Image: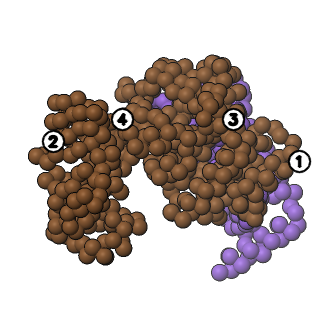
Chain colours: A purple, B brown
Amino acid sequence: MDLILEGLIKAFQLIIALDAEVLGITWLSLKVSGVATFISVLIGISTGMIVALTRFPGKKFVVSVVNTGMGLPPVVVGLFVTIFLWRNGPLGFLDILYTPTAMIFAQAVIATPIVMGISIAALQNLPAKMRLQILSLGATRLQMVWILLREARLPLMAAVMAGFGGVISEVGASIMVGGNIKGYSRVLTTATVMETGKGNFDVAFALSIILLFLVFLVNFLFTIIQQRERPR
Amino acid sequence: MTLKETILSVENLKVKLGGVSILDIPSFCIREKEFVSLIGPNGSGKSTLLLVLNCLVRPVAGRLTYRQDDISSREATFDYRRKVSMVFQEPLLFDTTVYNNVASGLKIRGMQKDETRERVMRYLKWFNIEHLAPRSARKLSGGEAQRTSLARAFAIEPDIIFLDEPFSALDPPTRNALTEDLASILRETGITALMVTHDQTEALRMSDRIIVMHNGSIVQQGTPLDVMNNPSNEFVASFVGMDTILQGKVVKASDGVVTISVSGAEIDAVSNAKFGETVYCCIRPENVSIELVHPDDLTSARNIFLAVINDISSFGPFLKLTLDCGFPLVSYVTREAFAVLDLKEGKKVFAAFKATAVHIIPGK
């Protein structure tokens, strides 16, 4: 019991003291996962839209591949991204292995299928005739796409939250492609793994609380955006 | 009635789905300020025709002309689509307020805020849903939702409005109230309308012209009275409520009056059918009267048959009697008459109808 109590006390001390290293780690976590989510939203929603709204042979196969991708194990992604970014790998010339950029890259790979899968489901869930209705109101294609996105905004925001939640809590890929380098590529999850390994439960505990709080804060913001403009 | 200018016409229209022909219409047109009803059974291609006319489904072949302009090019299609609007069976409202829903077509057209507001309020008022303006479209009753959908389609003040069974999902009182409102708004605005319905009474009540569709083609078009009273074939007859359709042979023909032999019985009818011809006799149930004693000369009815009541069922304000006169015959009687005559199943009565009440359709 002492372990937990001490951990809690230490955690609050670290948080209240605004420890520079902890702040740096937190900020990097937010930055890496934020940018990765942003990229995955751009790719996931746009391609998800195309998949959902067009008919093509093999569509079911594509959707099931995307859905499988939603459960992509981060360590597998970490392995492949490492191989790709390895000095003599296909993308080795980029020379970004063990950098935050590599982490963003890996996290975007993890989040994209999540965002895309939920987007496809969200858009397919709209009534089939909705598109015809929008066109019959005189909409251009672009206007139609915009209205459909608005119509699906609740599940689409859920897709964004799921994508962010998937990468901010991910550790395998970040450690593998980022290297958990102090002050450079160390994020909350990788730091927690390391501190726990060293037996510094109090620090690990503090980092975990910060991580939980961060996830809550971001999702709270997204939820406000999601639920805004809902008429009575 | 003077012939008004043709606003939309179709020539040699063909639509196929998976190699199967679902529409085949040689020619068809809608005139200015006309209210046309499209009736026909499920799967007859009514809704598909509506989508084609709205340029939402591309036909395999055919030409659409809007006020003398061909609208097959991409730009022309888009311009045309901005001049018409469509209401579907489901309200298909957007997840926002009623106000924003009605304004959506105007927003799409980039209309100024003040003008939009004025226009939206006008149509909300017309459809009696002003009080719902700030309400979420998700929290409306079926009737309110369909009113919102109609207001949205009317607010853009289209040249033609297409209505695809807009009332079919509503309960009868709601449907009646909405039908009345729609009819009066159409009269006031003079907007040309084409409505798909499977409710013949709705079609009868509202339209200038009825088009009957069957298996992807138009089988008859004309004024409601015309279609109801002179169905062009057996299918239209049964569809417009001619409950009794009997096949027979003309055994006597003179001066426009024919006698037709139907299962041994002889029916007199007014028709120009020729001797020996096979024909269908169609008799509306409301034209068949029931008597307890042989009416003799008390009536002008030329066709009087002894009949046994086989079945009695309720049909709105009437009771529907299925009779056996040697051939099947259907009659409607009021509940009052039913009580006075003390009718019951198995009872023998006399069924009478005039020669003019028999509509003759040439057989195949």
The residue at which mark 4 appears reads as: B232
Residue type, mark 4 in image:
Ser
CA separation, marks 1 and 3?
Answer: 23 Å
The residue at which mark 2 appears reads as: B261
SS of the residue under disc 1: helix
Quadrant of the image containing the C terminus of chain B = top left
When asked about the image quadrant of residue B236, the answer is top left
The residue at which mark 3 appears reads as: B159
SS of the residue under disc 2: strand
Label 4 and label 1 in one chain:
yes
Q: Which chain carries label 3?
A: B
Residue type, mark 1 in image:
Asp
SS of the residue under disc 3: loop
Quadrant of the image containing the N terminus of chain B = top right
**Residue B224: % across, % down:** 48, 43
Does the residue at mark 4 contact the one at mark 1 (Cβ under 8 Å)?
no
Q: Earlier in the sequence, mark 1 or mark 3?
A: 1
